Image: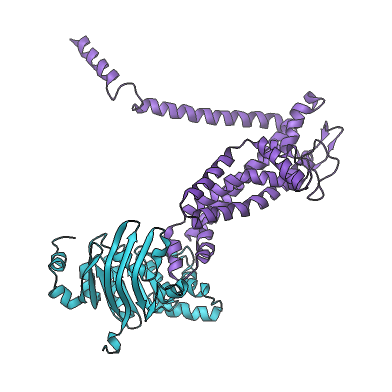
Amino acid sequence: MFNSEERIEINVENLNLYYGKFQALKSVDIYIKKNQVTALIGPSGCGKSTFLRTLNRLNDLIESVKIEGSITINGEDIYDKNCDVVTLRKKVGMVFQKPNPFPKTIYENVAYGPRIHGINDRKTLNIIVEKSLREAALWDEVKDDLNRSAMRLSGGQQQRLCIARVLAVEPDVVLMDEPTSALDPIATQKIEDLIRDLKKKFTIVIVTHNMQQAARISDTTVFFLNGEVIEIGSTELLFTRPKNPKTEDYITGKFG
Amino acid sequence: MNSTENNTIMKTKKDGKFGFSFDNQVIVFALLRTSMIIVVMSIAYLMYDIISKGIGAVSWEFITSMPRKGMTEGGIWPAVLGTVYVTMITALASVPVGVFAAIYLNEYASKNVFTRIIRLSIRNLAGVPSIVYGMFGVALFVQALALGSSVLSAGLTLGLLTLPVTITASEEALKTVPISYREGALALGATRWQAIRTNVLPSAVPGIITGMILGVSRAAGETAPILFTGAAFYLPRLPGSLSSKFMALPYHLFIMSTQHHSIDKVRPLAYGTALVLIALVVAMNLTAILLRIHYRKKLRG
């Protein structure tokens, strides 16, 4: 049915999520295609970040969360009892809103993931670190001193370091939760260029507040409102000919 | 006319918001300043008194030689060594337990009634009088566990006394580690323990060490808990093993200033002992501060 470029990587069916009694996600159905950038847009508190965190089960950490429905990644139900969270999070990496480098050297930040998964050989780590930093377009800026503290990098560099850190564990999917909201325009542009580049190898799901950003970098856009998916479709169509009047109101700036 | 005006002003001053009340910052500042002066002056006087009367007695020989002639002459070496030994055991006993308890409370325990009771117990433990710890130490370590009156029993008793401080300080240190360090690690596929061990604990180390040293330095000055668990009035020998009895600086000071047969004669020695004890505690606190600065610098890069 789909050609190789259009293969579905993540399929979400009838997903409901509750924080205690509050229902944050209401029967969400979403498909996410392989090697595409899927943008999640919507006003604050609409559930897009919550949804993103269901994909690597980071919501599991919150005690009061209850989840119903199914999410399959590459055909595997990630909420199945037999699903190993560690393996899942290796395959589904995440970049956070605020750059969160660990208080270690640049090298140790990138090597962190491989190390916890049992790679300790220095030569292998060296290769992984260089490759990941190159993929994150940071190598040229930091190659002279990888033993510098990551805390000394600029915000944009820190965020690219966090991306390199995710790439080092060789995920299939990269989740990004408003990765540029704490960055200046130039740093933002670098990250956007990077995202366009990364989709050749990875499937990317990005939450963004910025509709221009969604329009610039994504292939598919999902519009969330009050925990529901109002519309999902190709970015071009959704921004030019939205089917739902609520989508139109949002993208034309009538609310949000 | 003038006087009526004055009256109205007086009246508004009395009744109004800007009258004689705690909103008046001049008064509050005066109060703050007075409190500060009281604190500084008492410490300054205490230090002056001890240093001026003790410095004459203190010498390298005083610190490193044995007491002689019924403790009327000679030094305090056994007491110094005893305090150092017992303090080391205290640290070894209380730090691991304290850190692990703090990790459990801050990282694993769910927020329920049970956890609240544990926390409340720890706070209360901090308020238990030290003599009660002493008696508890006698019952548990000296008698029930048959460790006898020894350095080990005393060290463990002091370890219990320090535990609330170590747990609370470690927990506070863990709390200051940003949640993003945990999430970042977990999102890379780290297990909870991996995230804590490799990412959370290293950032919390400065706080933990500070808390540990402050707790232990308090324990070093305690008398009541070691009174019945291992401290001796006088010993001709240095403590040779974990089961030896020992002399300790605070207890020695207590003896020299209240129990000695010729108190007036040994008064300078008592002041000397007090000075050495205070110097030891200050040195430990200074170490805590220096270590904290060192680790902070290291973390910031």
Decide: is B219 above or below A22. Answer: above
Quarter in which the C terminus of chain A is drawn: bottom left
Q: Quadrant of residue A215?
A: bottom left
Side of A63 relative to B41 (left or right): left
Q: Residue at x 66, y 36 (%)?
A: B132
The answer to which of B201 and A30 lies nearer the viewer is A30
The answer to which of B171 and B220 lies nearer the viewer is B171
Q: Quadrant of residue B123?
A: top right
Tell me, what hue is chain A?
A: cyan
Query: Which chain wears purple?
Result: B
Decide: is B156 above or below B39. Answer: below
Q: Residue at x 45, y 62 (%)?
A: B181
Side of A26 relative to A91 (left or right): left
Residue A72 can be seen, yes or no: yes
x and y, in percent, of residue B139 in the image: 73, 41
Q: Quadrant of residue A214?
A: bottom left
Quarter in which the N terminus of chain A is drawn: bottom left
